[in-house]
Amino acid sequence: MSHRALILGALALGETTVRGLLEGEDVLRTAAALRALGAGVVHEPEPRLWRVRGFGVGGGGEPDDVLDLGNSGTSARLLAGILASHPFTSVLTGDASLRRRPMKRVTDPLSHMGARFAGREGGRLPLAILGTDELLPIEYRLPVASAQVKSAILLAGLNTAGETTVVEPEATRDHTEHMLRHFGAEVRVAPAEGGGKRITVVGWPELMARDIVVPGDPSSAAFAAVAAAIRPGSDVTIENVGINPLRAGLYLTLSEMGADIAFGNRREVGGEPVADLRIRGTTLRGVEVPAGRAPTMIDEYPILAVAAACAEGATHMLGLAELRAKESDRLASVAAGLQANGVRCEIGADGLVVHGTGAPPPGGGLVATRLDHRIAMSFLVLGLAACEPVAIDDGAPIDTSFPGFAALMNQLGARIGPMSGGLSTPASGPEVGAP
């Protein structure tokens, strides 16, 4: 939502004020890219708000340099939709992890609209985008459930005459649709023949600046929530968390596992449902997580695996093929991390089975994060419940999405910090989570 708030603020006329922005490195990369395109993006630390002066749907200029998006796949895919619909050439790149991630799923539909791309095999970054302001509207059926691909097409459709439609067989997060309407775009959602939804955006709207309050990120809140759920005696309240049903799959799953979760102060903020979550530690049990739930919690499976490791019995997670195309091969990374810490598991082509210990897991392992922030945070949380501390090889990736993670968790009673002993460690790690 933070990425979308900045992007739509740049495509609107006037000045948009954004409060509650997630100030992780990924979002800051989006802000820098929008500045390079001509938007005024200013951060005011007090009272912690951002101001975005937009250039309009058809505005913006060719960037003077390559747009380096670091580790942010969201930045790359959403900005590709914008850049495809503007008559200049731009180049996207990123870190080693982002350069391995698939972009063809975005470049294919944008190519059908009339944009041209030059990149590495599979459309991977670095990627040159030869945009045009004469794109053709399309109707595109998503071959894989992806809110990022859907959003890229809809954003390209803003600067395209006529109506651009995305058909999604499985529902994905709908933050883009909500926010487009908030800024004045005409967006229609209707049932699709054979199931799913048709999302249509009408091109060439005059978007107008709007104030936005971004709710707390449910993916970030997941780490404190699971930490509380797996530690007996814990009692943690996380305020102002977005609970959009298309993002809240983890919390539904934790409830099915027997977690003590209460949703208080339910309300709506900027068209999004929000609540305060209170989580108390209790005994969890293994469950089967259906494949159809994956789009609502695709980023939360690593931390769910940690909850599963502490539960009684086995947890079966299905429909996880998309995890292989994240910042790392998350399916392999999660399995390796669990096994390194004495937790038995098996992976398949698109599934994971975790055999819970029903007690504190052994721990004591060193986990390779593979430049993946969610792997890093998940296994630090495992260390909070394990018999022996759990170490990660690099804490630097955490800042891409959750700056201040360790400090916040330590305020709640964790002990996360650089390892002591006879190890030679880089400044960023290894880091260790201990009860």
Image (spheres, helix red, strand yellow):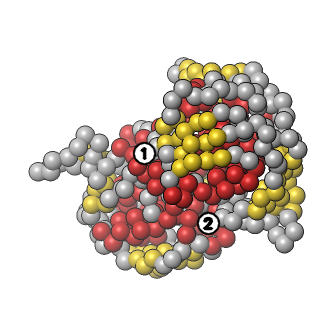
- Number of callouts in the render? 2
Which residue is denoted by mark 2 in the rendering? 294
Q: Is residue 402 visible?
A: no
* Element type where label 1 sits in the image: loop
* Element type where label 2 sits in the image: helix
Q: Is residue 87 visible?
A: yes
User: Cβ–Cβ below 8 Å for labels 2 and 1?
Assistant: no
Inspect the image, locate mark 1, and give the three-letter code of the amino acid beneath it.
Asp
Quadrant for the C terminus, please. bottom left
Left or right side of 274 for 368: left
The front one of 286 and 281 is: 286
- Residue 159 location in percent, x, y? 78, 37
Left or right side of 90 for 100: left
Q: Which mark is residue 404?
A: none
What residue is shown at x 86% (from left), y 41% (from top)?
A: 161
136 shown above or below 334: above
179 shown above or below 54: below
93 shown above or below 194: above
Quadrant for the N terminus, please. top right
10 Å crowding of disc 2: few (<14), some (14-19), many (20+):
many
Q: Toward which corner of the image does residue 31 lie, by quadrant?
A: top right
- Residue 203 location in percent, x, y? 84, 40
What residue is shown at x 73% (from left), y 43% (from top)?
A: 156
Cα separation, mark 2 vs mark 1, equals: 27 Å
What residue is shown at x 46% (from left), y 43% (from top)?
A: 94
What residue is shown at x 40% (from left), y 49% (from top)?
A: 96
10 Å crowding of disc 1: few (<14), some (14-19), many (20+):
some
- Residue 326 location in percent, x, y? 50, 58
Inspect the image, locate mark 2, and give the three-letter code of the amino acid beneath it.
Ala
Q: Which mark is residue 95?
A: 1
- Residue 215 location in percent, x, y? 64, 40
| Numbered disc in front, either 2 or 1 | 1
